[in-house]
Image (cartoon, grey):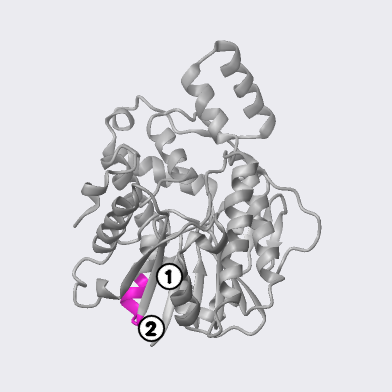
Amino acid sequence: MSAVLVTGASGALGPHLVAELLCSGAHDRVFAVLRPGRRWTERLSALRGAIGALTPGQAGTVKLDRLIPIAGDVCRAGLGLCGEDLGRLSREVEVIIHAAALTRLAAPEADLHHSNVQGTRHVLDLARRCPQLQQFLLVSTTCVAGTATGSIAEQLNDGPRGFVNGYERTKAQAEHLAAAAPLPVRIARLSTCIGGDRTGYVHRFGAIHHLLHWLTRGLLPMVPAADDPRIDLIATDVGARWLARAAGQAVDGLDVCQVAAGDRAIPLHELLECAVGHLRARVPGWRHGQIEPPAIVDADTFQLFERAVADIGDVLLTRVLEAAGSFLPALQYPKVYQTARAERVWGGPLPLSDWRMTLGKVIEFGSTHHWRHRPAQARHV
């Protein structure tokens, strides 16, 4: 009897990951940590509904009775668990996949540190109490590369490095915390997960979806970038499938893997052209030529645009630019992620989806739901 513990089960990646673990059958039980409180039942209902939406026609494969929800909070010591739950997890868990994180890029640094660094510390404390633990799998992000440029190796970043936002910084700190633990640790740096490759399903909208939303409404007439960089995107299912497979492979010491498009990343101009093509097929304003595609400009030109918006006093554009300021500067630091270690775990080239088709499905999904999170009852299948 084997058991895997997943934190962040209700996050953007969580339902995809839990669905893959249930489909794989490699573990007899999947403990899913969900934040307690008055919305706990709603979160559980949404998770089950999302699993159904992500696994259509697989009712015989996905056995929800193997899913064991746990009311816990990674921001509290012992995850805030009662003695009985804590004891059971300590005895039974063999693999911990720590996917919980605060991913709101513009969040206050203190909040990001509390969730991403202290939260990781608390889950590591739990891991040390598990005598059968075979792997602590930390779900990190390729964003920890920060302001580095060029080829990014699959190794812990030891030297000084700048960061675009506090999210990048705190995730890098979480990596160092996990690497220093006397545990079998695998760090999985996932690229930006855009949505489901089969349906475009997005459980929680993030920065890339805000960008697509603004593009849909014509609120971002220009994008600042250095030399048409490549944008590294993967389907959320790809990341989840890789994690589910990695959870079944033992790790000795520290292993750092980058689950990313790598040298198959998308040139920015191609990504924008593809997005515009999908929008012209779906959105009246685009179809009738009322909205123009955004221009790719240098940083100085974009700063002039920002000043013009401030001088005019356009409230909506000001809010968009303030939000975009937490991640658009990353386009000034082009990079390519090495993926050899991740491919070794997978057993070959990473199974990347057709990004054009995935992007179209995500745009359709986002437009259908007005780029907002759906109420729990609408997530049921």
Categorize mark 1 by other alpha carbons within 10 Å: few (<14), some (14-19), many (20+).
Answer: some
Q: Give the farthest residue toward the right.
A: 159
The residue carrying pointer 2 sits among few (fewer than 14), some (14 to 19) or many (20 or more) residues within 10 Å by Cα, namely some
Q: Amino acid at mark 2?
A: Ala
Give the residue at x 45% y 65%.
82
Amino acid on which disc 1 is placed: Asp
- Asked if the stretch drawn in magenta spans residue 189, the answer is no
**What element does badge 1 sit on?**
helix
User: In the image, what residue occupies the spot 18% across and 57% down?
Assistant: 381
Residue at image location 81% in from the left, 60% down from the top: 159
Residue 255 rendering spot, x and y as whole percentages: 64, 76
Front residue of 343/164: it is: 164
Tell me: residue 354, above or below residue 26. Answer: above
21 relative to 375 in the view: left or right? right
Q: Nearer the viewer, residue 234 or 170?
A: 170
Image position, residue 228 (x, y; %):
60, 46
In this view, 368 is above or below 7: above
Quarter of the image with the N terminus is: bottom left
Is 26 one of the magenta-colored residues? yes
In the displayed image of the protein, which residue is found farthest to the front?
83
Horizontal relation, residue 367 to residue 116: left or right? left
Residue 225 position, x and y percent, is: 62, 40
Give the residues drawn in magenta, as a range.
20-28
Distance between the alpha carbons at the discs numbered 2 and 1: 22 Å
Residue 85 circle label: 1
Q: As displayed, is residue 277 above or below residue 353?
A: above
Please name whichever residue, 133 or 130, is drawn nearer the observer in this view of the structure: 130
Q: Earlier in the sequence, mark 2 or mark 1?
A: 2
Q: Which residue is mark 2?
A: 26
Identify the image quadrant of residue 260.
bottom right
Tag 2, which secondary structure?
loop
